[in-house]
Amino acid sequence: MLCQTPRPWFPRLAAVMLTVCLPFVVRSSAVADEEIDFNRDIRPLFSDKCFACHGPDDAHREGGFRLDQKASALGQADSGATVIVPGQPDGSELIARITSDDDSLRMPPAESDKTLTADEIARIRQWIGQGAQWQEHWSLVAPRRPELPVVQDAAWPRNPIDRFVRARQEALGLPHAPQADPYTLVRRVTLDLTGLPPTIAEVEAFVNDKSPEAYERLVDRLLRSQACGQHMARFWLDAARYGDTHGLHLDNYREMWPYRDWVVQAFNDNLPYDQFVIQQLAGDLLPNPTLDQLVATGFNRAHVTTNEGGSIAEEVYVRNVVDCTVTFGTVFMGLTLDCTRCHDHKFDPLTMQDFYSLFAFFNSMDGSPLDGNRKDPAPVIKVPTDQQQQQLADYDRQLAAAEQRLAGPWPEVDQQQAEWERQLAAAGEPAADPAAGALTLSDWHSVGPFNDTQRYLFARKHGPEDKPIKLDQSFELADGAKVAWVRHPEWKDGVVHQGLPGDEAANFLYRTLTVAEPRKVAISLGSDDALKVYLNGKQVLAKDIARAAAADQETLELELKAGENQLLLKVMNYGGASGFYFAVKSGGTVIPAEILTLARKPAEERSAAEQQSLRDYYRNKVSSAAELEAARSELAKLREARAAVDREIPTTLIFRDTKDPKPAHCLKRGEYDQPGDQVERRTPLALPPLADDLPRNRLGLAQWLVSPQHPLTARVAVNRFWLQLFGTGLVKTAEDFGSQGEPPSHPLLLDWLALQFVEDGWDIKATMKRMVMSATYRQSSRVVPDVHRRDPANRLLTRGPRFRLDAEMLRDQALHVSGLLSEQMGGPSVKPPQPDGLWFAVGYSGSNTVRFKADAGHDKVHRRTLYTFIKRTAPPPQMSIVDAPSREACVVRRERTNTPLQALLLLNDPQYVEAARGLAQRALREGGADAASRAAYMFRLCTARPPADEELQDLVAGFQEELAHYQQHPAEAARLVQVGEAPAPSPDEVIEVAAWTALANMLLNLDEVVTKN
Amino acid sequence: MQPFEQYLRLMTRRHFFGRAGLGLGTAALASLLPERQAAATGGLPGLPHFEPRAKRAIYLFMAGAPSQMDLLDYKPRMDELFDQDLPDSIRQGQRLTTMTSGQSRFPVAPSKFKFTQHGQQGTWVSELLPHTAKMVDDLAIVRSVYTEAINHDPAITYICTGHQLPGRASLGAWLSYGLGSLNDDLPAFVVMTPSWTGRKEAQALYNRLWGAGFLPSRHQGVALRSQGDPVLFLSNPPGVDQEGRRRALDRLARFNQRTYERFADPETQTRIEQHEMAFRMQSSVPELTDISGEPQHVLDMYGPDVQKPGTFAASCLLARRMAERNVRFVQIFHRGWDQHANIAGDLPNQARDVDQPAWALIQDLKQRGLLDETLVVWGGEFGRTIYCQGKLTRENYGRDHHPRCFTIWLAGGGIKPGIVHGETDDFSYNIVRDPVHIHDLNATILHCLGINHRRLSFKFQGLDMRLTGVEDHQPVRALLDA
C-alpha cells in the first residue's frame, strides 16, 4: 500500500487551515465550500449557548420560543419578532440579538458565562443565509442505510468502512497512511482482540504467511480465543460498574463474580448483543429462565449500596433505582437521563415524566434497598460449580438412605417399642406425679431473620433479646420490613429442624416450660454457627462455633422455677442452611395424650401414619438404644458435611420483581420524600413507543431497546466497539449522544455499522472483525507532520490508532511476556500484592475489607487483571494510577493520561519487577546462548519485532554495563532477584539474572511497549 | 520555532505537573525550595479568573462530624434544660437518622465542657481547644454552615465533591484542573490520612473524596503515606540504586527517542518527561518528608506527636513544608469524630489530636509570611444534635448527626480575620442568621484562590459540571478580606 501524496492545497483552503488546527476537528470540518450542516455545525452551538433558556425545559423558558424545535425557532418570539427567517440573516431577530452592541440585549446574557465567538456567529449567519435547513437531532432519528460513497482512490478501501473514511479524507484533501508493517499489525490486532501481546511463534507464523488470507486467519483465530472474551468483558464491566465490595460506607465484600464470569462467557459464546441486553435487563422475566439468565440480571444490582447506620431506607431505595435508570440510559442509549431526575432536560427532548416512567420499570426489586453489609443481600442465587452440584447430589442420596434406615424397620428396636407400648397400655391413665414434677412444654414460636454481619450477630442484641417476651409483638428489621412471632405446633422435639430463614442472620425460638415445683431439667440442644440460650431473661449459654445443626451438640441443665418458665433460643447462622435441635433429656416429660392414645390402640388398627408417628416418638424421645444413637450421629455428620459444601457455593446478586409492582411517582426536585403525580411505565416520548404487544415490564423495555426502529441502541454499541479499537469513538462522547455530546465524525459510517450490526443478528464478533479487517484500522500510526497538523486527534483517521495500553493490558502484558501469566479462568476475585495499608488508611474499622491481605500462589497473584479484587472505596493502585475507574459509577469511556506516578508504578511495583525478572530468566532459559540472542529474544517478546542493529547493540552494551555493576555488587544482585513470588534463580545465575532484570525492567517501560502502535 | 514543533511543545505540556524543555539525562536534583513565584504549569487558560488572595490551600478535614456545641458554638442556656425534651418548635418535624428516630425522647444534653471568652471579640471557645482559643483573632469562625445529607458517606462525599453520590471531581482535583501546579517536582494535590485517638471505630474515608471523578485522573489527590513509600512505588526496587536508575532512564530515553523518530507521536515525548519527573520525585518527596532539619522550637510548637509519623501533628508540619514548596492543595483527613456516645471519653482525645497542631500550623505559616497567601480551612461534614443519643447524664452523653448547622473556621489568604459569622438558635439546632450552604463554603474557597465557581466547569454527561452544583450559590462576602 502506498502513501497517498497529499494533494496541493488550494489557496482558498488556506483560511480554513487555522480552524483545522483546533483540536475540535469535527467542528472544523465546516470548510468554506461545504454547506453548513445543522446537526454538525449549528445545533451544538444552540445547545451549549442557548438551550438553557430557549430549549426543552418547559419550566424555564425565556422569550416564549425554543431553539430545539423547528416550528418555534422559525416562528415568533413573545416580542413579536421572528426568531429566524430562512435566507435572511438580517431579518432574523436571533442575529440581531447575538450581534447587539447593547449589553442588556446581547445574547447569550453575561450572567450565563457563555459567549459566542465571531466565528460561531458567522457560522450561524451563514446557515440562515443558506436557508436555515433544519434537521431533527441526529441520534433520535433511526439510521437509514446510506449509499456507499464513491471514492477516487478506489484501490485503497478493503471494505465499506474505508469508503466512508476515505470519502471524508478526499473531501478535505487529506491522505490516508500506508498499511502498518506486519510486526506492528500482529501486535496491534492481538492486543485489541485479546488484551495480550502475541507470542514469538504467533508473530513468526503471521509474518511468514504470505498468503492473502494470512491476516484474516489471524483475526479469526484471535476471535476464537478465550482471551478474547476476557478482554471484551472488562470494557463492559466498567459500564456495568462491577466491583467486589458494596462501594458505600462499610464497603464490605459483595459476592457477584459469577456475573463477571457470565459476561466473559457471553462474549466468548458470541451471544448476540440483543440477547446480551435482554438477559441482563430482564433475564428473570424470560420464560423458565436458566441459571445463566438469572446470573445476567446482576447488571441491575451492580450499583453501589449502603447499610450505613441511620440510613433512611426509602431514600436509599430511590438512589438505587435512580442509578439503575441512569445507567440504563447511558449504557444502552447514550442518553444523559440524570439531568431529568430533578427537572426537564435542558438540552434534549426528555422530561421528568419520561425519567420517572423509566424509573417505574426498575422500582420493584424484591429485596431490601439496604445491603445489610452482607455479601449476598437478597435477591441472590446460588451458583454451584459442577463439582459442588455433584457433591450435593451425593450427600442427598446418602442422607435419604440414612433417614430411611432410621425410620424403617429395626427389629430389635421395634421389639423394645412393642414392649413399651404394652407397658403404657397396661399402666392405664398415668397418675399425675407432683413429686416427679411433670413438665409441660408449650409449642415453639419463632421470629426472624434478623440480618446482620457475622461479627455483630453474636455481639449485638437483636429483636426480643433482653426484653420481656410478648408474643403479639412485632419487630422492625433494618430494611423497614416487619416480622412477628409465628407458632410452630408442627415442630417436634428430638429431631433436627432445618430451614430457619436467612443466611447471615439470627432467629429466635421461644417456648414455655411449666412445672408445679422448682426443679432441674436437662435438655439437649443443637444449632448451627452460634447459639445463645436465655431462661427467664437470664443468659444461660453462649456458644460461637461454626457448625451445622445436629442432635445433642449441647447439653444443659435448666433450673426451673415453679410455674411458667420462659426459654428463648437465639440461633445464629453465618451462611448456608440453618436449623436447630431440642430434646428433654431428663425429668419426666408428660407423654402427649395423642401418643398415649395411639400406644393403647392395637397395632393392627393403626394407620400407617399413626404407626410412623408412634415410631418417631419412641425412637426420638424414649429409646436410648446404642444402634439408634449411632445411626443418628451418622445422619448428623452427613448433614454437617452437606451444609459445609452448601456454604461454599458462591452466590450472586440477581434482580427479581415483587409480585405486584410498586407504584412510581414523579419525585419533585428528585427528592425521595416529595412524591408528585403517579406515573405509569412507559418509554420516553421522544423515542419510538413501546409496541402494544410488548409487556410493560423490564422484558418489554429490553425488547423495545433492541427493536429495529430504535435509533440509539445499535449506534451506541458499535460506537463503543469502535472506541475500543481506535481510542476515540466515532461519537467522541460515547456516554452522550444528546445535543450536548459531540456529533459523529462520520455519521454515515456510524449508521452503516449500526445497521449492519443489526442485520448480522447483533453479531459482536462479526462487527469487531469488520472493523479490524478495514484498511482504516490497518494503517500505520506514524505521524506525518503536515497531516498531523490538520488531524491532530486522528478524528479523520488519517493514520492507525496509537495510544497507551489500559491498566489491565499493561499488567497482563508484563505477566505474559515474562511467562508468569496464569491462564486459569473465572472464579472468585484475587488479591495480588499491593502496598500495605491502602485499605486500612480509609476503611471503616468494622468493615470486613478494612485490612488487605495479599493472596499467595501462582493462580492468584499472576492471574489476568480482570480478576483482581476491586474494593471500590480504595481500588487497586495498579489500576487507578493508570486511569481505571473505581467502578463506583458507570463509565463507558476511560481517560488516558501520562503521569510520573505511572512511571513509578511500571518501574518499581514489585509485580512489575517480578515480571522483569521472569522475562530475564525466560531469556536465559529460551533465548539462546549469547547476550545478543538473549537481548533480541527479550526485545521480540516485548515489542513483537526484531531489534534494529543499533537497538541490539544498545541492549547488549546495557547488559554488559549492568553485569559489571552487579559483579561488583553481588549483594545488590541477590536482593533484586528476590522480588516476587516466582522461584529465585540458582546461586550461580544470580548476577546474570540481575543484570538482565535491570534491562527487562527498562524494556517493560519502553514507550513502544506500553503503547499499542 | 516551526509551527509543528510549537504544537508538539504544547502537547507535551498536556500532563500532570509537566515541565517543558527538559534536557535529557541532565535532571540533577532539582532546587529543593523552588521559587514561590513560579508560574503554574497545566491549568486552564483564563484562570485564575481574577487576582487570587490565596495561592494555595490547606484543608484540615474533621471526618465524622465534630460536636459544634462542645467546641465552638457556645449554648449556655442548655444547662437549665438538662434532660428536658427538645421542644417541637425547635425540631420542626425535621427528619432524623434511623439511629435516633426511634427514640421515645429527645432530651437536651448540655455541653459538659467549660467555655471562656477569647480574642478581641470575646469569642467563646471550649476548654477542649485551648490553642485554638489563642488564635481566634486569626480565624473567621462560621457557626452557620449546613448541608442536606444526614449520613456520613453521602455527606462527606457531598462536601468534598459537591454531590452525595460517587462519580464527581473533588475540590482538590478541581483546583489542580483549573489552576495547575506551582511545583514541577511535587503533585498539585496531596492528601494525608493521619491516625486519631478518639473513637476507635471510626467512619470510613473513600478514595473518591480526593478523586478526579470525570476530570482526567492526573488531577486526583496523591496520598502521602506515613508507612512504606510516602508516594506509592516511589522507591527503586531492592538492588537498584539511584545511579542504576539513572543508567536505566538514560537508556530508556534513547530508545524512546528512537520511537519518537519513528512514530513522531507527541505522547512519546511526554512519556520521556514523565520518567524524568518520576526520577526527580524520588528526591523531592523524601526531601519533603525529612523533617530532621526542622529547628526544635518549631517542632515544639506542634507538640510531642510531631515526631510520630502519621499523626495529625506530623501531617500539619508536612502541610507547612508543602506550602513552602507551593503545593497547590493539601487535605488532611482526621477521623474519629463520630461521637454517638461517650463524648466525655472520646471528644477530648480528638480535640487534643488537632488543637495544638492546627494552631502551630497557623503560627508557622504566619511566621514565614505564608499565611497571607495560604487559605486554611478546618471543619467536618455536618454537625451533631443537642439532644442526647443513648444514655444521658451530666457527665456523659452522645449526639446523633445533625445536618442543619455546624461550625467550621477559615484563616489566611483572602479571609477576614477575627470574625464570627452566622448564628444558631439556643439549641444549636436551627440557623437564625447568615446560613452558609456547603456549596457557598466551597464557592468561598474557590473565590480565595481566584476562581469564579460558576465559571469553573467541565462538560460531562451533557451538563456543565461544577463543584458547587446548579443551584444559585455564592461566595460568602462577609468572610472575605477586603
Image (cartoon, rainbow, N blue to C red):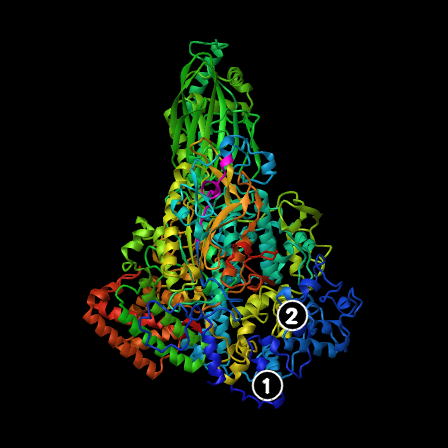
Q: Which residues are magenta?
A: B60-77
Specify the quadrant of the image occupied by residue A571: top left
- Binning the other alpha carbons within 10 Å of mark 1 as few (below 14), some (14 to 19) or many (20 upward) gives some
Q: Is residue A29 left or right of A304 when viewed as pictured? A: right
Q: Is residue B33 left or right of B95 when viewed as pictured? A: left
Q: At numbered mark 2, what does the secondary structure look like: helix, strand or loop?
A: helix
> Who's the residue at 49% across and 36% down the image?
B76
Specify the quadrant of the image occupied by residue A454: top left
Instruction: Verify whether residue B75 appears in magenta.
Output: yes
Residues tagged 2 and 1 counted as in contact (Cβ below 8 A): no
> Who's the residue at 74% across and 75% down the image?
A132
Q: At numbered mark 1, what does the secondary structure look like: helix, strand or loop?
A: loop
- Binning the other alpha carbons within 10 Å of mark 2 as few (below 14), some (14 to 19) or many (20 upward) gives many
Q: Position of residue A789 (x, y in %)?
A: 52, 82
Q: Position of residue A833 (x, y in %)?
A: 36, 57
Residue closer to the observer: A840 or A892: A840
Q: Position of residue A554 (x, y in %)?
A: 38, 28
Residue tagged 2: A44
Distance (Cα) linking label 2 and label 1: 25 Å
Disc 1 marks a residue whose amino acid type is Gly
Q: Nearer the viewer, mark 2 or mark 1?
A: 2
Q: Is residue A953 above or below residue A884?
A: below
Q: Is residue B290 above or below residue B259?
A: above
Residue tagged 1: A173
Q: Is residue A337 above or below residue A992?
A: above
